[in-house]
Every structure is written in structure tokens, then in C-alpha cells.
Image (spheres, rainbow, N blue to C red):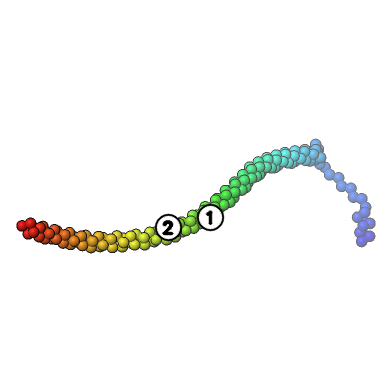
Amino acid sequence: MSALRGQVGGEISVEMDAAPGVDLTKILAEMREQYESLAEKNRRDAEQWFFSKTEELNREVAINTEQLQSGKTEITELRRTIQSLEIDLQSQLSTKAALEGTLADTEARYGTQLAQLQALISSVEEQLAELRCDMERQNHEYRVLLDVKSRLEQEIATYRRLLEG
């Protein structure tokens, strides 16, 4: 290998005839400048697109956050309303139960009083029927006695006429 290096290590001189006037360095510099300009423009466009999208997303986040907060507030208010309505319902159910208890007591009390009044009415009707019977009996006896009296008065009148002559 070192022998090969020694042979290659010698100098080789190559001469070329090139077309005069073409400056590759200048062309490469212009191309590099164009690509850098294009890359800078693309970077600015991408940055502008990124900022506009970021701003748009921030607006959407703000709107959605506001809507979320509004929704949370509405849910809280609805929960309060539900809780208030449940308390009101329990109160109404308690009132209903109390009124039903009072109604049952009142019905029982007046039912007992009604039964007592019915018994009293029946008793009074019985007494009235007995009084009617008694009055009819007394009326009959009175007529009989009145008839006896009339006959006796006639007899007495007849005897007086006979005695007087």
C-alpha cells in the first residue's frame, strides 16, 4: 500500500480548455441568493400563516371558553332551580300528607258525630211514632168518653124530663 501511495503521491497536472466568461461562482451565488430569498419568503409566509392560524385558534378558544363558562353558569342555575323545585315538591308533599291526615281525622270525627246524630234521629222518630200512637189512643179514648158523656147527658136530660113531668 505504501508503494501505491508513493506512486499516487506524485503530481499530476491536467490542463483544460474551458469556455471563457462563465463564472460558476457568480451563478452559484445568484442561485444561492434566489433560493435564500425564496426560503425567506416561504418562512415569512409560513410564519404569517402560523400567526393567523394561532390568532384564529385563540379567538375560537376564547369563544369556546366563554360558551363553556356560560354553559357551566346555566347548569349551575338549572341545578339550583331543580334543587329549589325539589324542596318545594317535598314541602307540597308534606302539606298534602298533613291535609290528608287532617281530612281523615275530620272524616272520622264527623263520621262518629253523624252516626250519633243518626242514632238520635232514629230515637226521636221512634219516640214520635210512640207519641202518635199514644195520641191516637188517647184521641180514641177521648171520643169514646165524649160519646159516653153525650149519652149520659141525653139520659140525664131524659130523666129530668121524666121527673119534671
In this picture, residue 99 sits left or right of residue 28: left
With respect to residue 120, does 34 lie above or below? above
The mark nearer the N terminus, 1 or 2, is: 1
Which numbered marker is on residue 45?
none
Q: CA distance from mark 1 to mark 2?
A: 24 Å
Residue drawn 7% across the image and 56% down it: 164
Residue 108 in sight from this viewpoint: yes
| Residue behind mark 2 | 110
The one nearer the camera, 31 or 122, is: 122
Q: Give the x, y percent position of residue 85.
A: 55, 50
Q: Give the x, y percent position of residue 75.
A: 60, 48
Element carrying mark 2: helix
With respect to residue 140, does 22 lie above or below? above
| Mark 1 surroundings: few (<14), some (14-19) or many (≥20) residues within 10 A | few
Q: Give the x, y percent position of residue 90.
A: 55, 54
The one nearer the camera, 119 or 60, is: 119
Q: Quadrant of the N terminus?
A: bottom right
Q: Three-letter amino acid code at disc 1? A: Ser
| Mark 2 surroundings: few (<14), some (14-19) or many (≥20) residues within 10 A | few
Q: Three-letter amino acid code at disc 2? A: Tyr
Residue drawn 55% across the image and 51% down it: 88
- Total labels drawn: 2
Which numbered marker is on residue 94?
1
Q: Look at discs 1 and 2 and give the one toward the viewer.
A: 2
Residue drawn 5% across the image and 57% down it: 165
Residue drawn 36% across the image and 62% down it: 119
Q: Give the x, y percent position of residue 7.
A: 92, 56
In this picture, residue 73 sits left or right of residue 119: right
